[in-house]
């Protein structure tokens, strides 16, 4: 067989910040003054973690050594010869990510060499030590792509103009959405367009006018969702609905008219479809008690035939 198939299984990190959002590269860069490519980073938690007391309220895990290959971002000081620690207190909003880092596990053809992995390390320097905020193993071929984004972000940080920063971030985010580059390995951006995102909270306080999307930007988001991502991210769909309510409902009603509660497509995507169907019913005031009960039964059942029946019954409500 000439065609090689490559599959990447991503162990998705599940981590929460103060607002329940996963940390993105953009957010990490905002608080890191060092981003380094290192040899494989030793696991600081297992099997022999060592801790040093920093104060009565803080303890950190000691990292014995970090061999730096290259800096993608470097402040006044690097990692060489510095005491390097990981804050393992729950108040560290990056802590959960550290415990379950995102790791790319490639399945490659037998005649191919396995990819070489390097550790990408984000850190913040203090007077007498370096604090690791996040680390992740990546295929070394991805590093140049990451470097390009880090350099771009560094230029934004030097603008000293919050309105311009905000506008450029939104434009970059939309362009990366359109080219499917937002987060192929771990996310460059959180969903910055959501009203509850850390991004919007920050810039609405600093430059509120800059957070308002232009008509052209709204159209671009709509075209992205309707074109390639209509069952990809319910939050994006809800955002498009705010700008184009009737058009969004008609679009999804049309999509659901061609989805039936049987067959391979439904079996693979049932849990995804039901989220969007619930959104349509709620948006059209058709999410009554019977519908709520049916959704609960759907969620609680693993039997395919029951899910199929419930799905068809809920679809009928869409047109009543």
Image (spheres, grey):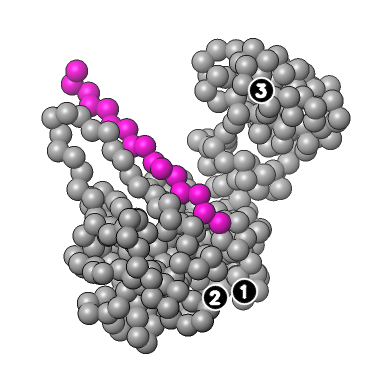
Please identify, in this view, whether the residue under mark 3 or under mark 2 is nearer the observer.
3
Mark pair 3, 1: CA separation: 47 Å
Q: What crowding class fits label 2: few (fewer than 14 Cα within 10 Å), some (14-19), or many (20 or more)?
A: some
The answer to whether one can see residue 153 in this image is no
Task: Please give the name of the residue rendered at 28% of the width and 38% of the height, measured from the top-left corner.
Answer: 106
Q: What crowding class fits label 1: few (fewer than 14 Cα within 10 Å), some (14-19), or many (20 or more)?
A: some
Residue on which disc 1 sits: 207
Please identify, in this view, whether the residue under mark 3 or under mark 1 is nearer the observer.
3
Residue 316 relative to residue 27: left or right: right
Task: Please give the name of the residue rendered at 62% of the width and 60% of the height, measured from the top-left corner.
Answer: 19
Q: Earlier in the sequence, mark 2 or mark 1?
A: 2
Query: In front: 61, or 167?
Result: 61
Mark pair 2, 1: CA separation: 6 Å
Q: Which mark is residue 162?
A: 2
Task: Please give the name of the residue rendered at 80% of the width and 22% of the height, measured from the top-left corner.
Answer: 317
Tag 3, which secondary structure? loop
Tag 1, which secondary structure? loop
Q: Position of residue 35 (x, y in %)?
A: 32, 68
Q: Quadrant of the C terminus?
A: top right
Residue on which disc 3 sits: 301
Q: Position of residue 20 (x, y in %)?
A: 60, 56
Mark pair 3, 2: CA separation: 49 Å
Task: Please give the name of the residue rendered at 68% of the width and 28% of the height, measured from the top-left corner.
Answer: 299
**Magenta residues?**
1-16
Query: In front: 133, or 171?
Result: 133
Query: In front: 93, or 250?
Result: 93
Does residue 47 show up magenta in the picture? Answer: no
Q: Are marks 2 and 1 in contact (CB under 8 Å)?
A: yes
């Amino acid at each position: 067989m000439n065609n090689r198939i490559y599959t990447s299984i991503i162990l998705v990190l599940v981590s929460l910040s103060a607002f329940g959002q996963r940390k993105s590269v953009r957010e990490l860069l905002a608080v890191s003054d060092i981003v380094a490519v290192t040899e494989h980073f030793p696991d600081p938690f297992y099997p022999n973690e060592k801790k040093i007391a920093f104060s009565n309220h803080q303890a950190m895990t000691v990292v014995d050594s970090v061999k730096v290959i290259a800096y993608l971002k470097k402040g006044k000081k690097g990692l060489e010869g510095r005491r390097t620690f990981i804050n393992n207190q729950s108040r560290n909003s990056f802590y959960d990510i550290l415990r379950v880092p995102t790791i790319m596990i490639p399945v490659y053809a037998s005649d191919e060499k396995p990819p070489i992995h390097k550790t990408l390390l984000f850190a913040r320097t203090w007077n007498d030590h370096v604090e690791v905020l996040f680390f992740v193993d990546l295929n070394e071929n991805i590093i140049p792509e990451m470097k390009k984004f880090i350099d771009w972000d560094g230029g934004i940080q030097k603008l000293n103009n919050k309105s311009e920063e905000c506008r450029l971030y939104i434009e970059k985010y939309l362009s990366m959405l359109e080219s499917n580059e937002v987060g192929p390995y771990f996310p460059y951006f959180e969903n910055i367009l959501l009203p509850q995102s850390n991004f919007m909270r920050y810039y609405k306080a600093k430059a509120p006018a800059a957070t308002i999307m232009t008509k052209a930007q709204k159209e671009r988001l709509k075209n992205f969702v309707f074109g390639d991502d209509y069952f990809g991210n319910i939050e994006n769909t809800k955002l498009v609905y705010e700008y184009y309510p009737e058009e969004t409902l008609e679009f999804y009603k049309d999509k659901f008219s061609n989805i039936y509660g049987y067959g391979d497509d439904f079996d693979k995507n049932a849990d995804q479809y039901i989220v969007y169907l619930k959104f349509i019913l709620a948006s059209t005031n058709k999410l009554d008690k019977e519908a709520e009960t049916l959704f609960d039964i759907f969620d609680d059942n693993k039997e395919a035939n029951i899910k199929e029946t419930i799905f068809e019954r809920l679809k009928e409500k869409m047109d009543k």
